[in-house]
Amino acid sequence: MQYPIFNSFINRIKADLNKKNIKSEEFVVWTEETINAIGLELRIQLDDISPYLQSVTINFDWDKFREVSLARQLPGMEKHPLLNIKNDITNTHLKPNMDVEVSWKFNQDYILEGRQIKDTNWRLDLASSWMDSMNRRIGEVLPADYIISRWHIEIDGDTHGRFLSDMSLISYFQFTLDRQDNLNQILDFISKRFQLILVRSNRIVHIASTTADQLAA
């Protein structure tokens, strides 16, 4: 096991999900040896909470360089497997920052139900208006510590004009782990950050609902 610290992160997140009785539809740990990377991807279904969203996917990205950097910082890590290997990785001074990507997948078809507008591309125009309304409120939920937030959309067309076939809001951010003194503190910090992601996801659900209702008014 080359990533004992990251594996402890995985176990804590899994325990937090169980404690909150949240079922993850996907919980996948991946590794990519060519770039010395490891990560956790989990997906939580939201369609039973709101008709406007299908799911939220959370990706935690890590690598050997950050694993080594954090192992050096923590007491009791003398036997960490990566510290006993003499190569460029053990000489790294990279800060142990966790990269996180959060993606909310929307049910773009739902906002079209019951609408009577029949102009060309009305479905695309309506979805665009909804995204504009959400953009004006996203800053309330995704503050400056989220490095960047962007929309991912896919546009298709049929005999009735163009429409969005996929609509997702993606946010990227990172948090540093170099300010804690021991592994237990770091695991508690991971739990708090994970809880914050879940809280902000709930607020995204609320914003999606209220902006769609306003659009229909």
Image: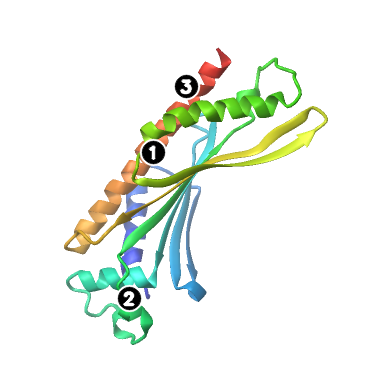
Q: Nearer the viewer, residue 19 or 202?
A: 202
| Residue drawn at point x = 43 percent, y = 28 percent | 137
Question: What secondary structure is found at the residue carrying circle 3?
Answer: helix
Front: mark 3 or 2: 2
| Residue 216 visible at all | yes
Cα separation between marks 3 and 1: 17 Å
Residue for badge 1: 142
| Residue 51 visible at all | no
| Residue drawn at point x = 21 percent, y = 70 percent | 73
Provide residue 130's location: percent of width, then percent of height.
Answer: 56, 26
Do callouts 3 and 1 mark residues in contact (Cβ within 8 Å)?
A: no
Residue at the extreme bottom of the image, as rendered: 86
Residue for badge 3: 210
Q: Is residue 88 left or right of residue 187?
A: right
Image quadrant in which you'd find residue 52: top right
Cα separation between marks 3 and 2: 48 Å
Q: Residues within 10 Å of mark 1 (few under 14, many from 20)?
A: many
Question: What secondary structure is found at the residue carrying circle 1?
Answer: loop
Residue for badge 2: 92
Q: How many marks?
A: 3
| Residue drawn at point x = 77 percent, y = 35 percent | 157
Q: Is residue 112 left or right of residue 119?
A: left
- Residue type marked 2: Thr
Of pointers 3 and 2, the one earlier in the residue sequence: 2
